[in-house]
Image (cartoon, rainbow, N blue to C red):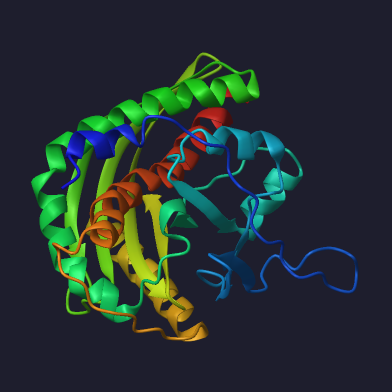
Amino acid sequence: MISLKRLLVLFSSCLAIAAAQTPRPVPDGKTDASAPLTVTVGGRDLLIPMPAEGFVRCDGINDVWDKAMSGFLPATNRLLGYFCTAADAEALRQKTQPDMGTNFNLQTLRKLETEEVGTKTFASISGSMRKELEGMEEQLKEKLKKAVETGGARAGEETNVEVALSLSDVAFVGFFDEANPSVLGFTMAMKGQGTIAGKEHKTNSITAAYMVPANGRLLLLYATRPFDGEADRKEAERSVKAWGEAIMASNIKVEGKAISSGAGGLFKNVGRSGLIGAIVGGLAALVGIVIAKSRRGAA
């Protein structure tokens, strides 16, 4: 069995965001940012609808923003798309400060891109993954805090702006959509602060993460919004669940094979490192809010 220490080491470095497929062109020569995306994971095309009405794809618009965000992706994850409101996308295009109060992003795990992970496959290990998450909560909190600090330093190097980010608190709020064993949904509340160009700002956010299989490939979905109370948690969970269901309905359903927790390599990849990758991957969404808020104050 692979040790937790070894798994955590996998997330100590970062990798620049890999380019995803571009939205289809429209007659005026621009791109239709609200059109569904077609992304390729492990040689298979997946259709990805927008996460909610009024949201569009916003990575690939502003190089500075993309570079700042890239430092917070774990090396094991590949970004497939980052989504914000149309107003935030326009702000990025005009090189003004976006709000990013609510945003979504979609990732996959690099080491699983060619693995067949169907609904039956994931259902056979999701219960063990829940137990694993509960057992490693305190260790993961510390790892997340360190990942934010080091990621902030990388963002500063990429953008030539002094950046210092940190998490003062991380809480695993709980699981959602537990009646469906073919998915795994969990929620994290985070208190973060950022100092950019000498100005400090704080933010509370909630991130709902949703791991879903689509066309035999495992996807990581995130919905992040400011956190003021229970209503925000429920809305984050509702919105990411609705997005995940739309993605699954838009793609071929592959059942795959059930596996046991002692089945060796596949369980290690999907269950343990997949879970940690899903948690650390949520930092990209959180940090987007902190950076945007801090930079608005610094502007």
Left/right placement of residue 136 relative to residue 80 reads: left
**Residue 139 image position (x, y, % from top left):** 16, 35
Left/right placement of residue 292 relative to residue 267 reads: right
Of 294 and 1, the residue lying toward us: 1
Left/right placement of residue 246 relative to residue 55 reads: left
The answer to whether residue 227 of the structure is visible from this angle is: no
Residue displayed at 67% across by 33% down: 64
Locate residue 176: give its quadrant: bottom left
Locate residue 40: give its quadrant: bottom right
Residue displayed at 89% across by 74% down: 27
The answer to whether residue 141 of the structure is visible from this angle is: yes
**Residue 54 image position (x, y, % from top left):** 59, 68
How many dots with numbers? 0
**Residue 70 image position (x, y, % from top left):** 55, 37
Of 47 and 256, the residue lying toward us: 256
Residue displayed at 30% across by 55% down: 269
The extreme right residue here reads 28
The extreme front residue here reads 264
Of 207 and 245, the residue lying toward us: 245
Residue displayed at 57% across by 33% down: 68
Of 189 and 112, the residue lying toward us: 112
- Vertical position of residue 61 compared to residue 29: above or below: above
| Location of the C terminus (image quadrant) | top right
**Residue 252 image position (x, y, % from top left):** 48, 86
